[in-house]
Image (tube, rainbow, N blue to C red):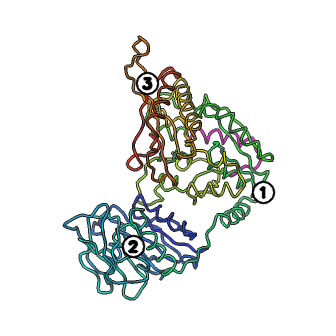
Amino acid sequence: MDKIIIIDYGSQYNALIARRIREMHVYAEVISHLDEITYDQNIKAIILSGGPNSVYDELAPKLHPSVLSLNVPILGICYGMQLLIQTFGGKVGPGDIREYGKNQIDIEHESLLTLNMHETSTVWMSHGDKVLELPETFEMLASSKHAIAMVKHKEHDIYGVQFHPEVTHTSEGKTLLSNFVFEIAKAKPNWSIKDFITSKIKEIKEEVKDEQVILGLSGGVDSTVAAALLSKAIGKNLTCIFVDTGLLRKHEAIEVIQNYEVFSDMNIIKVDAKQEFYQALKGITDPESKRKIIGRVFFEVFEKEKSKLKNASYLAQGTIYPDVIESISIKGPSHTIKSHHNVGGLPKQSTFKILEPLKELFKDEVRAVGHTLGLGEELVNRHPFPGPGLGIRIIGEITEEKVHILQEADDIFIKALRAHHLYDQVSQAFAVLLPVKTVGAMGDMRTYEHVLAIRSVNSTDFMTADVSRLSYDFLDEVSTSIINQVRGINRVVYDITSKPPGTIEWE
Ligand code: XMP
């Protein structure tokens, strides 16, 4: 399989570059700038991502020597372009005028990179530094009002762009990336979901052999698809454990088990660990600590179940690509935003070997795998639900009573979305219980109860998200139902923060 390597210099959006390329059916992978790239004939090109540093800072990430030694086409984006210019002897420095947001570029010299692009094109810029002087070996291909916008090495397939072709605001960004991938790197579009499934099944079989695998089933899309894939690969050697953490949605514990009845030959064990979780979370308010504790208790439960099974040495998880990128910063400089428990929470002393068959995939790709494996719409199109569950949707200390209040309110919201045929039109919706009480009046009584936030977002890959434009009438209906039916809540607010700057979950 041909692949394009993307080197992470710290941009939050480097995963978007990978996404754009995979949309063209070419496999793309993000690695840290510290990693050495070893020769692999499948590597067709390297892309250097953007990043927050200035190339002239002493501690700024450098170009790893292995990048040039591979002799494959290179495209530097923003910081990546400035790094190329500096490495080849040019000059980069602070610009007089920074360019953020939409800008225009004029293409002055045509090249393979600009094939089928207009002479003037709208691009999205985000830079303070700029190229002050080109190395002798480079030529300028395009400029913006204040900066050199596109460059090319005179003899080699080394290109740089000051703008971000991966974001949708760059109107011809897809054309440019496609030119790089197909015209310059000559990659073949041979990445498909079917191939992914076939090669993953083979890989799992080869790795696991006759050993037993335990998988934590949450009822969400990711773990369900991971279970289906593993089940295809190793059959009865897979045991799924569904843990009732006491932090699930209303009726979730029952519904999940019912949903899995279609997998007639799958071993599923249900473990009631509610009290273990509540006990461990007593008095804890810090979001990161909650995530870590929930992760730890999960693993303790798994370890206990594991000891009951013969030969169970693997733990499989439904980790997906955004979890990996957003939580461990792939040894690179992308900032850690949250520790997703299923990536960052594995205790060091754990004896499990980890299997994460979906860790290269984006959410919509995971759904496509689910569809291809024949899972039902209902299962595949469920909104994502985070591993730590309602634990990260109760801000402040978690108590059984608060879980109950949130479950009731969340259930009303989700049912209303379904009743109005909105559930499938939004990507993820949920309620969050706040540790804030406000005064209200119900009947002639003064009330002093919790505030509930409701949130609904639209997104394809959950790396970025927009607020769902739900109508006021609908929101009004939901708010009224919640306040009338759920004791403990007397005010409902709608969260109108997109991602970024917010994250989807509140903690
Ligand atoms: P954020 O809040 O980071 O969430 O914008 C992005 C997506 O990931 C889900 N999420 C998680 N999923 N374990 C999971 O399996 C976690 O710890 C976790 N935290 C967030 C979140 O619901 C959204 O879909």
Magenta stretch: includes residue 130: no
Q: How many marks?
A: 3
Which comes before the other along the chain, label 1 or label 2? Answer: 2
* Frontmost residue, 426 versus 279: 426
* Frontmost residue, 398 versus 415: 415
| Disc nearest the viewer among 3 and 1 | 3
Residue 210: image tag = 1
Q: Is mark 1 within 8 Å of ligand 1?
A: no
Residue 54: x %, y % from top left = 29, 65
Residue at the image position 57 percent from the left and 69 percent from the top: 27
Residue 76: image tag = 2
Q: Horizontal placement of 192 versus 36: left or right?
A: right
Labels 3 & 1 near each other (Cβ < 8 A): no
Residue 55 occupies quadrant: bottom left
Three-letter code, disc 2:
Gly
| Disc nearest the viewer among 1 and 2 | 2
Which comes before the other along the chain, label 3 or label 1? Answer: 1
